[in-house]
Amino acid sequence: MVYKSQSEWRWPIAVEMFCGGAAGGTYIISAISYLLFGGRIFLAGVVASVVLALISILVLLADITSIWRTPRVFLNFKSPLALGATGLSLFMISSVLTIGIMHTGLAASALYVIVWIGTAASLLTLIYPGILMGMMRAIPLWSGSGPSLLVLSSGLLVGAAVITVVGGLGNVNFNLSLVVLCLLVVYGIILLMYIIMGTQGPKAAQMSVQQLTHHGLSSIFWIGVVVIGFVIPLLLYILSPSEQILKIGSLLILIGGLLMRYSLLASGIKISMLRDDAIIATYWLDH
Amino acid sequence: MARWGMVIDLFRCIGCHACTYACKVENRTRKGVFWTLVYDYEVGKYPNVIRSFLPTLCMHCENAPCEQVCPSGATYRRNDGIVAVDPNKCIGCEACVVTCPYNARFKNPKDNYFSQDVYPKDERSVLGQPGVVEKCNFCKDRIDWGMAHGLTPGMDWNANPACVNACPVNARTFGDLDDPNSEISSRLISNPSAEVMHRELGTRPSVYYISMSKPLSGKIKKG
């Protein structure tokens, strides 16, 4: 087979991307009313974001060669990975400081600056996987700004869902269910456009989309990403029956977010070095 | 300063894989790790089927995507154009493996495949570290050693990459792309249709292929 999907980044990276994005989105949604309208910070959301970021960091550390080499991840700032690691580190520091200040009341005057730094770091944490994937011209489906928009919209949606799950409904000073609904619609539109643009792209991009919609990843995509991660939550949030049902809808959003990242990684088919009609004979050398 | 490159003549390649094994012996790569690969493939429909071979390796791109994504700076481009990996800096994130359009990079398994007693280190070979990414480096140790001893890479056996020496049909030519008198330059001049792989990506590889676009009919080109 002349077209193969990349096999290096699978579930561990999907989990790391999901947790990192969820952490960033959760922090932003928790702090947004404080930053823009002088409202309050949803502390449980900030705590949840720290837990999610910790999981992301632990998965990342488990995936690399040696924990002692971790400081090297900051050395080349031309790489989105280095920027993302920096963002994640700044985010951890800011979130822990935010929690500390809110708990103890000490250095309260610094809270505004710290939350702004945390928000900027959260945005970087949210978006760096998309930037990294967008640089990879070897995988046409990923190339460009599509992945950045997708992970950004998904990250904010997942963050709002996390806040709903940890008791945000009625405890934040904005209409959280409306925010989740709006983010769901935006995410759905971006996902649809991303898939459509993939079908218009080079052969490898079209094959990636076919993997998602018709072939090996179709179950995960249609059932996990579309139905569980989008359609059912959308219906639940439109009908808004009860707080418990909305929490279930948010849990489904989280599942869909994780499966979206996995299917995006697993469907990354590389451009071929051979002609489209070539049949490879050296299977034992094909890696 | 030289700018090292390679020309591969697909008309000459017979798919013997001598280059693959020479590279493996020279660089002591691990099981399943091939710094150079020869794709053996068929195109066409019966009865007009053509069997062709495509040797691949790291293209040592001027605009290397692997260097751009590497967070630790382990992947670097030397002044002579060779893109190399410092195994002591690599964190094994595999971003470079994913981004490489030429499938030229491999992550070593984390187990210790070679016993240190069986293959002692010498000054020109470094055993692959577990868990780090490695790839073809144009046998830079051989090139550096050769130049330090007054030899000319591309002309002298001991200063050539192992794959170039091993090829029985001289399908691979190595040398200084900036030297108009080098054999590689003369091959490029006499084959103006020589091209790089995936030019549209803007990576600017240093490895050129002769007869890449033309359907190969099995005729042997003289000269």
Image: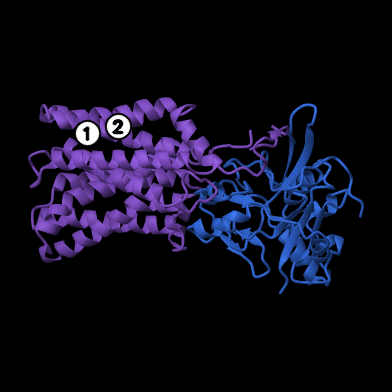
Distance from disc 1 to disc 2, alpha carbons, whole Å, reads 9 Å
Which chain is purple in the rendering?
Answer: A
Q: Can the viewer see residue A83?
A: yes
Mark 2 belongs to which amino acid?
Gly
Mark 1 belongs to which amino acid?
Ser
- At 10% across and 28% down in the image, what residue appears? A242
Which residue is denoted by mark 1 in the rendering?
A250
Tell me the quarter of the picture where residue A238 sits: top left
Q: Secondary structure at mark 1?
A: helix
Q: Nearer the viewer, residue B198 or A171?
A: B198
Q: Nearer the viewer, residue A138 or A99?
A: A138
In the rendered image, the vertical position of residue A274 relative to residue B160, given as above or below: above
Which residue is denoted by mark 2 in the rendering?
A229
Q: Are marks 1 and 2 in contact (CB under 8 Å)?
A: no
- Chain B: colour as depicted: blue
Q: Position of residue B88 (x, y in %)?
A: 57, 57
Q: Nearer the viewer, residue A128 or A152?
A: A152
* For residue A45, side relative to residue B181 (left or right): left
* For residue A133, side relative to residue A247 (left or right): right
* For residue B215, side relative to residue A15 (left or right): right
Q: Residues within 10 Å of mark 2 (few under 14, many from 20)?
A: many
- At 28% across and 54% down in the image, what residue appears? A122
Chain to which the residue tagged by mark 1 belongs = A
Q: Position of residue A196 (x, y in %)?
A: 41, 39
* For residue A214, side relative to residue B45 (left or right): left
Chain to which the residue tagged by mark 2 belongs = A
Q: Position of residue B195 (x, y in %)?
A: 71, 56
